[in-house]
Image: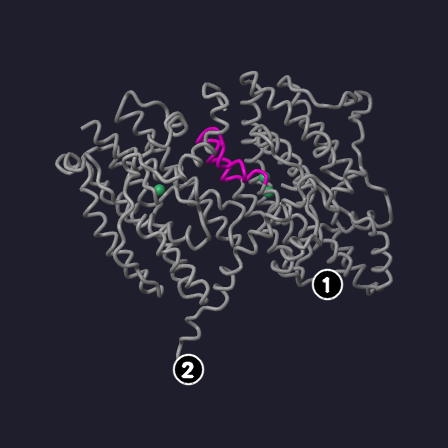
Amino acid sequence: MYGNAYIEPDSELAAKMAASREEDPEKLAEFEARIARGEKIEPDDWMPAEYRRQLLRMIEQHAHSEIIGALPEGTWITRAPTLRRKLALIAKVQDEVGHGHLLYSAAETLGKSREAMINDLISGKSKYSNIFNYPAKTWADIAVIGFLVDAGAIVNQLANAKGSYGPYCRALERICYEESFHLKQGYDAFVALAVGTPVQREMLQDALNRWWFPPMMHFFGPPDTISVHTEKLMRWKVKMASNEEMRQDFIEQYVPKIWELGMTLPDPALRKDEATGVWEYTQPDWDEFFRVINGDGLCNKERLAVRRYAEENGRWVREALMNPIQKRMVPYA
Amino acid sequence: MNNAIKDLLFRLADDELVLGHRNSEWTGLGPILEEDIAFSSIAQDQIGHAVANYTLLHESAAADEPLPDAIAFGRNEKQFFSSQFTELPIGDYAFSLIRHFLFDHAEMLRYELLTASSFAPLAALARKIKGELKYHVLHADLWVSKLGQGTEESRARMQTALNEAWPYALGMFEPSDYEAELVTNGIFSGEEGLQESWLEVVAPIIEKAGLTIPQASEPKYGGRHGYHTEHLQPLLDEMTEVYRLDPAAIW
Ligand SMILES: [Fe+2]
Ligand SMILES: [Fe+2]
Ligand SMILES: [Fe+2]
């Protein structure tokens, strides 16, 4: 699962700096022509430094989001209320870890090692999707995450799968295939609660209220400012759709499914303007979005602490894989 | 004979459920992503085996046994017949790995014996499960060898884990009250023989990994008769936390 790549606030500055690192105009023209023809860029192909930097950051963030995203759901595996749900949840979280694995490999093709990426994650230097900085408080949260967060991830990842970088597109194709199972399972668990006992419905409504505002409304990021920079990223097929386009797509597909089950969403302004086909909604607090991204969310510290704990506790295993005693015991001959 | 079969199925299923629960705790926290994924797979297989055995209990062995979920989530520790080995906390990765190694070899041999059981539904299930276990055992053997021969630290951790695990591992072979009946009726050939063949299989692998089997350990018995360590009831409380909100609800 994943939210949209977060474009740094200083990206205009970074773009100016990158632009000053003049790329060879001939190579740049050929590169842009290839992308315009729909060709994929492969790791050994020439690419502008700015393209490499943006893609690496995006794929790395995506990989981190998968790994961190495994944590809130992972804590409910041992508490799943039926054996069937337990099996499905383990398989799902396992897939997410697998997505992280696949994406780290895709990012490595751009020149940064998995280890360096994980170090940047646990030091807090790299970002991941904000949505995982909110807590999963009850079993109903697992249904809401499996349904809506995975649905959001699919909207985002289907768009990105049509991007220009070959290794990322191929990873996303496989990931999207698995995410669609997650969505199915998530929806199934969601429906079970929605048509269940009063206690179950109440749990679900509570979870829905908490996940809609602000996490889901923040999921695709703030409405993009149309700048020369975002235009270039779209021309290079790094960014495939605007944040608002994806949010509209998500609302259009999933809000009716929620309402259909008699559940409500905590936004009285949420409605479709039938004339324009555009959904109206209350803007979430975007200051909070930036506060959470920069570390001040409900769970940022806990998520990183858990990840750091896993890394530190696993260090001896990784070291053992790197220096077998055996090697030292082999006689020189 | 009914009680003998019931007892046998409870032991098989409860071991799988409890250890599957423990192994699933690694999901998202493994020492490397590849092992994180491997432990999730093992946990899924084990919980799958528990479901299969509970289903057998419900369908073929005892008409009074409820559906698998109710069997799994509706009992307290006294009603669990898993070995104490399975309920111990995950510890460090060395302990979980050693437990996986010792348990899965025993399980593989146990199901191999059960393929010849006169209780036909169990023999059929054993044939199915046996194939999956081959991969568990290969995985365990590979990692015991890697970490036994990795660094000084990894070897020390593996030896410590083995020392801690061993008496509990022997507890897996705690005889049943129905032992004679099971043997006479050709349902299961018995714990003693199983323990012997298990030792023959695991001892050389442990030795090759540079580790030493601890001497003179008293087996930790009790689990097979409902006597558990302080770790099982909290595990069950956690496992049933949501289920208990409304056991009649459909989740
Ligand atoms: Fe994913
Ligand atoms: Fe997913
Ligand atoms: Fe098993």
Q: Residue at x 65, y 26 (%)?
A: A208
Tell if the residue under mark 1 belongs to the same chain as the one under mark 2.
yes
Give the CA distance from mark 1 to mark 2: 44 Å
- The quadrant of the image that shows the N terminus of chain A is top right
Mark 1 is on which residue type? Trp
Magenta residues, start to end: A72-92
B68 and A259: which is toward the camera: B68
Residue reaching furthest to the bottom: A333
> Badge 2 sits on which subunit?
A
A304 and A284: which is toward the camera: A304
Q: Residue at x 34, y 63 (%)?
A: B211
Mark 2 is on which residue type? Tyr
Label annotation for residue A332:
2
Mark 1 crowd level (few <14, some 14–19, many ≥20, 10 Å Cα): few
In the rendered image, which residue does mark 1 sit on?
A: A46
- Chief SS of the magenta region: helix
Q: Residue at x 33, y 38 (%)?
A: B82
Q: Looking at the picture, does residue A330 appear above or below residue A304?
A: below
Which image quadrant shows ligand 1? top right
Task: Pinpoint residue A219: horizontal percent, then vertical percent.
Answer: 71, 37
Task: Pinpoint residue A188: horizontal percent, then vertical percent.
Answer: 54, 27
User: How many badges with numbers are in the image?
Assistant: 2
A242 and B125: which is toward the camera: B125
Q: Looking at the picture, does residue A107 appear above or below residue A130?
A: below
Left or right, B127 with reference to A127:
left
